[in-house]
Image: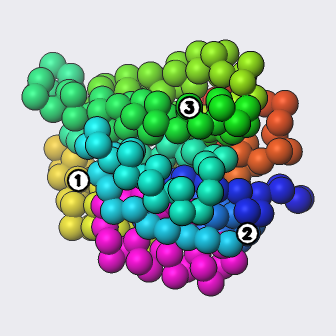
Amino acid sequence: MELDLRDKVAVVTGATANIGRAVSLDFAREGAKVVLVGRDEEAGARLVADCTDAGACGAVFVAADVLDPASPTRVLEAADTLGSIDILVNNIGGNVDQGFFVDSDPDKWMADIDINFGTVLRMTHAVLPGMIERKSGAIVNVGSTAAIVGDYMLPVYSAAKGAVHSFTVVLAKEVGQHGVRVNAIAPYATISTDPAAFSKGSRFHPDSGLFSKGAASVREEDRAIRQRRTFVGKPFASPEEMSGMVLFLASTRASFITGQVYPIDGGALL
């Protein structure tokens, strides 16, 4: 399928790991110009090289933490070297902690909200004026199935991803008149087996210990409640199984689609 993405300028946040990395490489294979945003400069340099080898018409890495309100300006400055931004993929997300809400630390609530929702607001707010002026653009947000069903022991993360979904819908209503489309995907558990997909800033990096620490505190009863099954022969998705939908939604082949949230869950929500 021809997606007409050659020479399009696509900004991908959280680009150096997992879903973001797969999306970046797929844009590169389509001949897009990619602006890769992440915190791990070593992983960023590798990704620029990989995108160039894959066929990107241009690739630049921006070492930026989008939790910093000043970082979107730096991203826009880097993007200007490649051209006007056609596509924004808001991919940054993660959970700072896990456990029951009653036991949660209020000092950590805003961290979960900011990494999952605040980053979306910041980057979108920075990119939108240019898209509106040009009467063209596509935004794809990465939400989560947690926003649809509420992931057990991830209350604030689930709520923040729910905000991403709601924002996707209302923004599509606001900017459709300006030729800008806004959609989202809602991934189920997505884990890469490629060591290159684990940047130092990723919660999936083995050194983070986030998942091992959480697993040690889960009782069997809680594990049973959290358990879901897929119907595609494997328990987890790969990043490449998410990136295809992101590219489609960003492309002209999806020009009549806006304000939608697409679960990619292997049937886990059935």
Q: Which of 68 and 108 is in front in this view?
A: 68
Measuring from the top left, give residue 112's x and y in whole percent: 27, 34
Specify the amino acid type for callout 3: Pro
Name the secondary structure under disc 1: helix
Categorize mark 2 by other alpha carbons within 10 Å: few (<14), some (14-19), many (20+).
many
Main SS of the magenta segment?
A: helix
Specify the amino acid type for callout 2: Gly
Measured in 3D between alpha carbons, the distance from the residue under mark 1 to the one under mark 3, in whole angstroms, is: 37 Å
Q: Is residue 177 above or below residue 65?
A: above
Name the secondary structure under disc 2: loop
Which residue does the image show at 70% across and 36% down from the upper left? 134
The way the protein has been coloured in the rendering is rainbow
Measuring from the top left, give residue 63's x and y in whole percent: 33, 62
Question: What residue is disc 3 on?
Answer: 129
Question: What residue is disc 2 on?
Answer: 31
Q: Do the residues labelled 2 and 3 touch (CB within 8 Å)?
A: no
Specify the amino acid type for callout 1: Leu
Q: Do the residues labelled 2 and 1 touch (CB within 8 Å)?
A: no
Categorize mark 3 by other alpha carbons within 10 Å: few (<14), some (14-19), many (20+).
few
Q: Do the residues labelled 1 and 3 touch (CB within 8 Å)?
A: no
Measured in 3D between alpha carbons, the distance from the residue under mark 2 to the one under mark 1, in whole angstroms, is: 36 Å
Measured in 3D between alpha carbons, the distance from the residue under mark 2 to the one under mark 3, in whole angstroms, is: 25 Å
Q: Nearer the viewer, residue 121 or 132?
A: 132
Magenta residues span 34-56
Residue 6, image quadrant: bottom right
Q: In this view, does 259 lie above or below 56?
A: above
